[in-house]
Image (spheres, coloured by chain):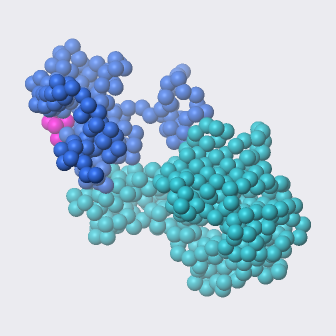
Amino acid sequence: MLLRSLYTLNYRNLHNQTLEFGPGLNAIVGKNGQGKTNLLEAVYLALTGLSEAGKLEQLVQHQQQEGFVRATLERDEGPSIFEVGVGKGRRVAKVDGIRVKAGEMLRGAAVWIRPEDNDLVLGSPSVRRGYLDQLLGKLSVRYAAVMALYDRNLAQRNASLRSGEHWALEVWDTQLCDLGSEMLTMRRRVLLRLQELAQAAHEALGGGNSLELTLQETTTPESYLFDLKNRRSEEIARGNTVIGPHRDDLELKLHGVAAQTFASRGEARTVALALRQAEFELLAEKNDEMPLLLIDDFSAELDLERRVHLLELAHRAPQALVTGTESFPRALLTYQVEGGMFRR
Amino acid sequence: MKYPSSLIQLIRELSRLPGIGPKSAQKMAFHLFEQPLEDIERLAKVLLAAKKELHLCPRCYNVTDRPMCDVCTDLSRIQSQICVVESPSDVIAIERSGEFRGLYHVLHGSISPMQGIGPEQLHIKGLLERLSGATSDQEVILATGTTVEGDATSLYIQRLLAPLGVQVSRIAYGLPVGGALEFADEVTLSRAMAGRQKMV
């Protein structure tokens, strides 16, 4: 898959314009706050229908009601047009002029690498869980669908726990166990390969060979129902479901100790980068189309050696959009951005 | 300018109807105002009559204007089959198919703790009463929706009925007839696959 062009209308601070991209490394260079990140977000929105930047209406330019992005793609089967319009609490997604649900767009089309990735290592378990769930959702529509059902069940079960009457608690247990077990099984299966890829990337980044990824599970498919029964009184007291895939952590260890507690900022950056590289490689392996690589704020907190490595990764991808404050050597195409206006 | 208070009241009442937002309610209110008085009187009469004459069938809880509903009083229907559905409109949908010749039981909702709806808020007790003294010939078909809540409701009833020794089945999940496989979503497809039927 190749992103040929992107048109934005009323999108954040971006000028309404069409930008063209080529295969290889596309550089976007400018000072901070000019619209580099917004452009990557607009690309992500156009491809996936999803926003990582928060509420939909926040994507729309100040004092405008609706915003719009259109991506022209070159896919194996020919050219294709992806469009997403957003307004207050509303989103209209179209592929080649036909309306689709956001989930039916290219969920796994892009991998983001950005400075906030440090939170993957230093942040709370929910960040790492989010990484894992998002990655699995990119690999399998089934996982995303099962997770949506799981979340719905969980909300009903928690409401039941809090109701005082514990309406049909056993029934929610059964459904939660079925769906949760499927999630756990899929997570375990993906983790094996993810672990290998992350370790290799970490080593290549000069971080050594001591990175370990393990799932900290609060229950297992085998003991799920039993564990739920055992924790019943605690769950009723807390009004919350305390075990299950929504409470698990993807633990990262360096030299045998938890990276969340012991990693330095530099080490954390390297681990985060390894996780993103592993994500990219896993998607490239499992999905039919190679993902687009989006690297935001290229040089953030990276030393020379790691910059070289990241640049190599960007060159290895069929297509990468890379933002930074200084121009890139060997970039195929460079846009200068100032105040939301892009110039080649 | 302020709206006259009777107009505001009318809009407020109309907007309480399902699927009607404030804008539609306003449109309807002005439309009603423009109609001849006799039309409005007829509408009001019909509304009142419907509310006064309609009630739930004491046996199956479907909506009826008779002491007992048409289905329950029709002795040609198979008395040993009860199809459990969420709403009266589900009964109409199944009746339209003409496939089912048994009886119904309408729950009037599904279990949803988030909305404060538990089994006691549904007509589940009535179902159990109907089944007291039932033999193993009796079949209960659970045809609640395939939502999370519909599934939970079916599972709940299935557990309640287990000790009674009646046959319990769940309506099949599957592909829409006339729909191509490629357009089915993942979950529907995998459920349809799991519920496949042997041909040879």
User: Magenta: predominant secondary structure element?
Assistant: helix
Colour representing chain A: cyan
**Which span is picked out in magenta?**
B125-130
Observer able to see residue A163: yes
Q: Residue furthest right?
A: A330
Does A116 appear above or below B196? Answer: below
- Indicate the quadrant where residue A8 lies: bottom right
- Indicate the quadrant where residue A258 lies: bottom right
Residue drawn 49% across and 28% down? B176
Residue closest to the eye, A328 or A313: A328
Q: Residue furthest front?
A: B1
> Which one of the lettered chains is coloured blue?
B
Asked if residue B127 lies in the magenta stretch, the reply is: yes
Residue A320 coordinates in the image, percent (x, y): 78, 60
Residue drawn 44% across and 34% down? B173
Residue A120 coordinates in the image, percent (x, y): 61, 72
Does B194 appear above or below A280? Answer: above
Quadrant position of the C terminus of chain B in the picture: top right
Residue closest to the eye, B166 or A178: A178
Observer able to see residue A113: no
Does A92 appear above or below B52? Answer: below
Residue drawn 73% across and 75% down? A31
Residue B82 coordinates in the image, percent (x, y): 25, 28
Residue drawn 50% across and 67% down? A248
Left or right: residue A27 versus residue B82 is: right
